[in-house]
Image (cartoon, grey):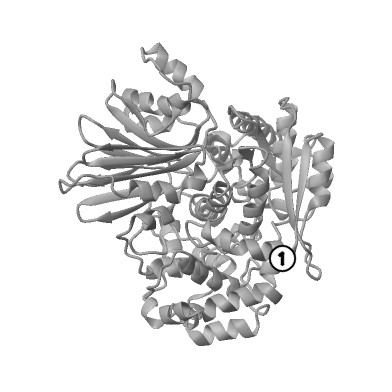
C-alpha cells in the first residue's frame, strides 16, 4: 500500500522534474520509504508503506534489468505466493520476497492480461525498456486510485489528485458534467471525470497502454454481470447461504496476508462483525478491533458502541473505543477535507479520518466491511427498483440528491449545459446486459457509485495516516457470487437478507436483526454552532463568491435553514456545497467557471 506517480514525455524532453513534488505530496500514503527512477523520457516516483517483505529488496520503483522492466505499484496481490510458485516453475528467479516483483514476472510471462490472475487491489505502472511502452492498470473494483493529466508532449499519473496539482500545469477549471454528478450522485463523479477539467481517473478494471509516440488505448479486462445464471436454477436458499460462507471465508483469509499485524475496523454492524467472527474462527490471535463514535444530537445517536462492544466481548478481541466530542471533530474538519483526493460529502469521512489516526498507532493493516450493502442489496432504494418499469426515472427519484430543476436553482447558468447525471444513468442502464431494473441498479451501484463513494472515502481517509484497509466484500469472487444470487433473496426483509441468513451461527442474532445503522456524525447532518460557522465562513469567503459556482440566492436559502433541506440519503445539502468549496480552497484553486 503506497503512493505512486510518474511522467512520460513524447516531445524529446527528459522526464522527472515533477517527481519530487508529487512524491512529497503523497508522503502520508507511504511514510516508510521513498524512491525515484528516471530514464530519459520516463520517470517513476514512489512512497512506501511496508506491509509485505519489509526488506529493502522490495522497495520501489523496482527495476528488473534482466527483464527490462520497471514498476511502481500501490496495493496488495493476495495470491502472490501461489503466482510466485507458478512463475518459479517456469524458470523465473526472484531477488525479493514480496508481491511487487511477482507482478513484474507475471507481466513478463503473460503480458498485460496478467491482471486477470491477480486476487487483490492494485494500481500500477510498468515501463518496458526495449519498446518504450508504459502500461497502467487498476483493479476490478477500483479499490486503488489512479489519476492522470495530459498535456501536449507529456502524460503524468499519480495515486492522488493533489499530487498532480503539486506538479503544476493542470487545468483547474470546474468540469460542468462532473459538477452535475457531484450535486446529483452524492458526490460521486464517475470515471474518467473528476471535478477538475484537467484531471481524469483511470476507470476500474482497465488497462491503459501508452506508446512512445503518445498514442494511448484503454481496454476493460473485467465486467460485472448482475442477474441469474441458467446453471443456478436449481440452487436453494440454503445452497446460496453455504456458497456465501465458503466464498467469504476465503476472501477474509486472503486478506490476512501480511508481514505486520492485521486489525479490523469494527462498526458494530453485520458486515464488520462477520469479518471479526471469521478471523476468530481462522485462529487469528490477539485480534485488534477499533470503533469510533460521536456525540448524540437530539434523538440522533452518534455511536454504535453497544454492538461493537458485544462483538469484541464475544470474540475476545483487543478492542479500542474512540469517542469523539464536538471540539475534536470541528478541529479535524480541515484535515479531513485536505485528505480527500476529490471532494466527498458523506459524514463518515471524518469518522474514518479520526478512526484511522488512532488505528495507525497500533496496526498498519485493517480489514473493513465496505461494499456489502451494494453487492447484497442493503440500501433503502432497492425495493423501489424491484418492480420498476422505468428504472432510470425511478433511480433518479430515490437516489439523486437533487432533480435537474433544483440544479438550475443551485448552479450558475454557465455550468448548466445538460442533465448529465440522468443521461449517464440512462446510458449505463441501456448498455447493461441485465434484464431487470433491480439488477441494472445493483450493477450501477457496484461498478460506479461504490467505487467513487465508500471505497474511495476509506482509502483516502485511512491512507492519510498510513493505514492500509482491506475490503473482503470486494473480493471479485464474492462480488461475482453476489451478482448471481436472485435479487429477491438480497433485497428481502429490509435488505441483505441472504447475507444475514448466511451469518446466523457465526454472528449473534442481536447484531444480525438490529435496525440498519450508518456511520452517524450528527453534527454534520444538523449544522449548528461551530459546524455552522465553519460552513458559513467557507461559503462567504471572497474566493467562493468570486468563483461563482453556486447561485448566491441558493446558498443564502440553505444558510437560512440548514436543517430544512436534506438529500434522500438524509444528508445536508448545505454541507454538500460547503465541502466542494472548502476542498477547492484547500487545494488553493481560485478559478471556477
Could you say where residue 449 lies in the image, as x and y percent from the top left?
52, 56
| Quarter of the image that includes the C terminus | bottom left
Give the class, few, some or many, for how many residues have Cα within 10 Å of label 1's Cα (few <14, many ≥20): few
Vertical arrangement, residue 66 with respect to residue 256, above or below: above
Under tag 1, what secondary structure? helix
Foreground residue among 105 and 447: 105
Numbered label tally: 1
Q: Quadrant of residue 109?
A: top left
Query: Is residue 279 shown above or below 493?
Result: above
Residue 69, by quadrant, is top left
Q: In this view, does 573 lie above or below 28?
A: below
Q: Work out whether residue 257 can be spotted.
A: yes
Extreme residue in the left direction: 12
Horizontal and vertical percent for residue 496?
A: 68, 48
Q: Could you tell me residue 40's position as x and y percent?
A: 21, 39
**Which residue does the image show at 28% across and 48% down from the upper left?**
17
Left-right relation of 6 to 394: left
Instruction: Give the left or right position of residue 409, taking residue 154 as reference.
Output: right
Residue extending farthest to the bottom is 553
Q: Relative to residue 189, is residue 559 drawn left or right?
A: right
Horizontal side, residue 432 vs residue 303: left or right: left
Asked if one can make out residue 146 in the rendered structure from this viewpoint, the answer is no
Residue at the (41%, 68%) spot, across then down: 589
Q: Position of residue 417 (x, y in %)?
A: 36, 76
Q: Mark 1 points at which residue?
A: 327
Q: Is residue 395 above or below residue 451?
A: below
Question: 119 or 2: nearer the eye?
Answer: 2
Pick the residue in front: 338 or 77.
338
Amino acid at each position: 500500500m503506497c503512493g505512486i506517480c510518474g511522467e512520460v514525455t513524447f516531445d524529446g524532453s527528459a522526464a522527472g522534474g515533477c517527481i519530487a513534488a508529487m512524491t512529497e505530496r503523497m508522503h502520508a500514503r507511504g511514510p516508510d520509504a521513498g524512491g525515484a527512477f528516471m530514464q530519459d523520457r520516463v520517470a517513476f516516483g514512489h512512497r512506501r508503506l511496508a506491509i509485505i517483505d519489509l526488506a529493502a529488496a522490495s522497495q520501489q520503483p523496482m527495476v528488473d534489468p534482466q527483464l527490462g522492466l520497471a514498476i511502481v505499484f500501490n496495493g496488495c496481490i493476495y495470491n502472490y505466493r501461489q503466482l510466485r510458485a507458478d512463475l518459479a516453475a517456469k524458470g523465473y528467479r526472484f531477488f525479493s520476497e514480496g508481491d511487487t516483483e511477482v507482478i513484474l514476472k507475471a507481466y513478463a510471462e503473460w503480458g498485460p492480461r496478467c491482471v486477470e490472475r491477480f486476487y487483490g487491489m492494485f494500481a500500477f505502472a510498468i515501463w518496458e525498456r526495449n519498446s518504450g511502452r508504459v502500461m497502467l492498470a487498476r483493479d476490478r473494483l477500483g479499490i486503488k486510485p489512479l489519476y492522470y493529466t495530459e498535456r501536449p508532449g507529456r502524460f503524468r499519473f499519480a495515486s492522488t489528485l493533489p499530487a498532480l496539482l503539486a506538479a503544476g500545469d493542470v487545468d483547474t477549471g470546474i468540469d460542468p458534467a462532473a459538477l452535475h454528478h457531484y450535486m446529483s450522485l452524492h458526490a460521486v463523479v464517475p470515471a474518467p471525470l473528476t471535478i477538475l477539467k484537467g484531471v481524469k481517473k483511470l476507470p476500474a478494471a482497465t488497462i491503459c497502454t501508452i506508446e512512445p509516440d503518445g498514442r494511448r488505448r484503454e481496454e476493460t479486462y473485467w465486467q460485472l454481470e448482475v442477474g441469474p445464471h441458467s446453471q443456478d436454477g436449481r440452487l436453494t436458499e440454503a445452497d446460496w447461504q453455504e456458497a456465501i460462507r465458503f466464498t467469504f471465508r476465503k476472501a477474509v483469509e486472503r486478506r490476512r496476508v501480511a508481514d505486520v499485524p492485521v486489525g479490523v475496523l469494527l462498526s458494530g454492524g453485520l458486515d464488520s462483525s462477520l469479518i471479526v467472527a471469521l478471523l476468530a474462527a481462522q485462529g487469528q490471535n490477539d485480534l485488534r478491533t477499533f470503533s469510533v463514535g460521536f456525540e448524540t444530537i437530539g434523538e440522533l445517536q452518534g455511536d454504535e458502541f453497544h454492538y461493537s462492544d458485544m462483538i469484541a466481548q464475544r470474540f475476545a478481541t483487543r478492542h479500542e473505543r474512540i469517542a469523539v466530542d464536538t471540539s475534536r471533530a470541528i478541529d479535524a474538519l480541515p484535515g479531513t477535507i485536505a485528505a480527500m483526493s476529490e471532494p466527498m460529502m458523506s459524514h463518515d469521512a471524518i469518522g474514518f479520518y479520526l478512526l484511522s489516526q488512532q488505528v495507525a498507532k497500533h496496526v498498519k493493516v485493517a480489514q473493513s466491511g465496505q461494499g456489502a450493502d451494494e453487492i447484497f442489496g442493503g440500501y433503502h432504494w432497492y425495493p423501489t427498483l424491484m418492480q420498476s418499469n422505468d428504472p432510470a426515472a425511478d433511480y433518479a427519484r430515490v437516489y439523486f440528491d437533487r432533480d435537474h430543476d433544483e440544479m438550475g436553482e443551485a448552479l450558475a447558468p454557465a455550468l448548466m449545459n445538460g442533465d448529465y447525471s440522468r443521461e449517464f444513468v440512462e446510458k449505463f442502464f441501456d448498455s447493461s446486459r441485465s434484464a431487470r431494473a433491480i439488477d441494472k441498479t445493483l450493477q450501477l451501484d457496484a461498478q460506479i457509485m461504490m467505487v467513487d463513494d465508500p471505497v474511495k472515502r476509506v482509502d483516502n481517509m485511512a491512507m492519510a495516516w498510513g493505514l492500509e484497509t482491506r475490503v473482503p466484500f470486494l473480493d471479485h469472487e464474492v462480488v461475482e457470487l453476489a451478482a448471481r444470487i436472485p435479487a429477491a433473496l438480497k433485497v428481502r426483509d429490509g435488505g441483505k437478507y441472504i447475507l444475514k441468513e448466511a451469518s446466523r451461527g457465526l454472528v449473534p442474532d442481536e447484531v444480525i436483526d438490529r435496525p440498519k445503522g450508518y456511520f452517524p456524525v450528527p453534527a454534520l447532518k444538523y449544522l449548528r454552532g461551530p459546524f455552522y460557522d465553519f460552513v458559513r465562513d467557507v461559503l462567504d469567503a471572497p474566493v467562493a463568491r468570486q468563483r461563482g459556482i453556486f447561485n448566491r440566492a441558493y446558498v443564502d436559502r440553505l444558510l437560512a435553514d440548514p436543517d430544512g433541506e436534506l438529500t434522500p440519503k438524509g444528508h445536508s445539502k448545505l454541507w454538500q456545497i460547503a465541502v466542494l468549496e472548502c476542498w477547492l480552497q484547500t487545494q488553493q484553486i481560485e478559478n471556477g467557471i
